[in-house]
Image: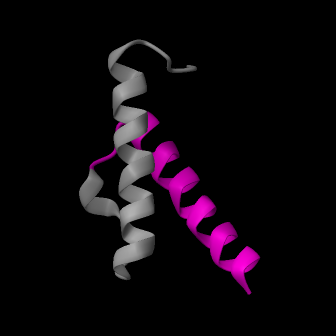
Amino acid sequence: MKRQKRDKLSRAHSKGYQAGIAGRSKEICPFQASEVRSEWLGGWREAIGDRSIGLTCK
């Protein structure tokens, strides 16, 4: 069970990162559950930071 939960959070983080790299708004976060939403937003923030220092792949 724990592995499944971590996988879900990891996937949420990854999806948030992808959205951030694509320049999407954090308002499009598809998750309502606070833990998963927090992971998605963490990925999104990480991507925004990476974009600001030029780490994007176009």
Give the answer, above or below, for where 48 lies relative to 36: above
Q: Is residue 30 visible?
A: no
Front residue of 14 and 6: 6
At 24% across and 60% down in the image, what residue appears? 27
Give the answer, above or below, for where 37 lies relative to 19: below
Query: In the visual, does 41 lie left or right of 16?
Result: left
Region of the chain picked out in magenta, as a range: 1-25
Q: Is residue 55 visible?
A: yes
The C terminus - image quarter: top right
At 75% across and 75% down in the image, what residue appears? 3
Does residue 10 belong to the magenta stretch? yes
Front residue of 14 and 28: 14
Q: How many marks?
A: 0
At 35% across and 36% down in the image, what residue appears? 23
Does residue 9 belong to the magenta stretch? yes
Residue at the limit of the structure toward the front, as seen here: 2
At 34% across and 45% down in the image, what residue appears? 24
Give the answer, above or below, for where 47 lies relative to 34: above
Q: Quadrant of residue 51?
A: top left
Query: In the visual, does 49 lie left or right of 9?
Result: left
